[in-house]
Amino acid sequence: MQLNEELQAVLDGKKGETQKKVLYTMMRYGELFGADAMVPVTSRYNHLVTSFGLKALTPVYDLLDQLIRESAFSKQKFSADPRPLDPNVPSSFLQNIVFRHFMYTSQEQYEEQLRKLGLMDPDAFTCTCYMDEVGNVPKQGEVLSWSESSAVVYANSVLGARCNRNSGIIDLMGSVLGYVPRFGLLTDEGRRADWIVEIKTSKKPEAQLLGSAIGMKVMEDVPYIVGLDQWLKTLDEDAKTYLKDFGAATASNGAVGLYHVEGITPEAVQQGRDLIKEGAKTYVIDDGELERIYKSYPVIWKKKNAKPKLCFMGCPHMSLNQLITWTKRVEKGLEKTGQNKVVIPTVFTAAPAVIKEFEKTEYGARMKDTGIILSYICPLMYMNNPLCGSMPVITSSNKLRTYTSARYYTDAQILALITGGVRK
């Protein structure tokens, strides 16, 4: 591992034992993946995946205390993934006991540690830190030290930044050190495409379903997607919202950290098919393939035909554009079915900063009138326990479906279900 003069001084212990341990950790991590050097983190802000104060994470809290005692703070301010709890989200008496007395008992203590280490804002808790309203928007070519999978794939693909799919705590270590090991998606070669994915569907594919299909096929490889530009046209807010959800599905149903969309994403626009490696494999997606993928999803509810008790939308968190669009959809759906409010308890989740801006618009009050609950919560952390595992929860998030017992439906099916329309 090649080290510059600054890092060699750290390794020699001249910046203290704690900084030396941080560097040593990052070096060992990089060597596992064949890294030959450390490169500076150049983004203005960092993002941490670990945002939940689970009782079981005592070693993490001890580690953070050591960093704080030794003034080994993050060299960048940072955002973090969503909070796990919100009193506005429906929960039973027993769930509240489990959440507050057994699972997330260290939440307040942990958030205080994050503030001391460099949290960019007291409410900077979201998996979509790259939203303009949040302000953690990397520029093309900037090197990051992130680990939240849906944020990493968005930053790499839609923004053209450079970041590997790191693990939790490694993201913080890179920010404390100010350097990350150079390998994988930080290199030009690592960003070239291993697959050509040809989209030959009769209509615009469901973002979460298309992402799922690609993720399960290419796994950790880089896909170059052809044919999607006929529906996205340009990288506007609608396209960014689509790619947010699409990318999250590729990352959770596979392990994609970067994709290129011909004519849309920045590197594909700049380099075109020069991004494709020689001998790249081809995957064709048509209507039949998407239907096959959809039917392959297991339903793990105890009662497969149970009436849904909860609907979660926003994993990853919804954009301002999405909140407004969905408010209009729900209003029309309720008008069509003659209902005043949604017939299934429904939670839309978004970043606190996005919620703040949304509530300034006329749509904030209009959404409230539909009965929808707007929250900053992490649906995955809410459901990641045995009590919620037995609940029939529905979602259009393939990430939430993959990591919990939530059942996937398309956006159109979700709309019909929550507004009292037919189920299928």
Image (tube, rainbow, N blue to C red):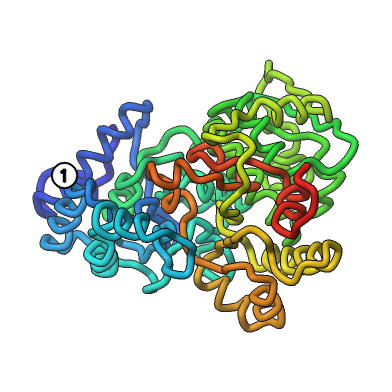
Horizontally, is 148 left or right of 400 in the view?
A: left
Label 1 SS: helix
Any part of residue 178 in sight: no
Residue at image x 69%, y 18%?
281
Q: Quadrant of the N terminus?
A: top left
Horizontally, is 87 left or right of 233 in the view?
A: left
Give residue 91's quadrant in the image.
bottom left
Q: Nearer the viewer, residue 274 or 300?
A: 300
**Residue 359 rendering spot, x and y as whole percentages:** 61, 80
Placement of 336 over or under 381, stated as above or below: below
Residue at image x 75%, y 64%?
330
> What's under tag 1, amino acid-wise?
Lys
Placement of 195 over or under 249, stated as above or below: above
Any part of residue 400 in sight: yes
Placement of 72 over or under 361, stated as above or below: above
Which residue is situated farthest in the top direction here? 279
Q: Quadrant of the C terminus?
A: top right
Q: Nearer the viewer, residue 37 or 194?
A: 194
Residue marked by disc 1: 21
Horizontally, is 18 left or right of 253 in the view?
A: left
Q: Residues within 10 Å of mark 1 (few under 14, many from 20)?
A: some
Residue at image x 62%, y 46%?
307
Q: Nearer the viewer, residue 21 or 338?
A: 338
Placement of 346 over or under 391, stated as above or below: below
**Residue 258 rendering spot, x and y as whole percentages:** 58, 39
**Residue 73 rendering spot, x and y as whole percentages:** 23, 62
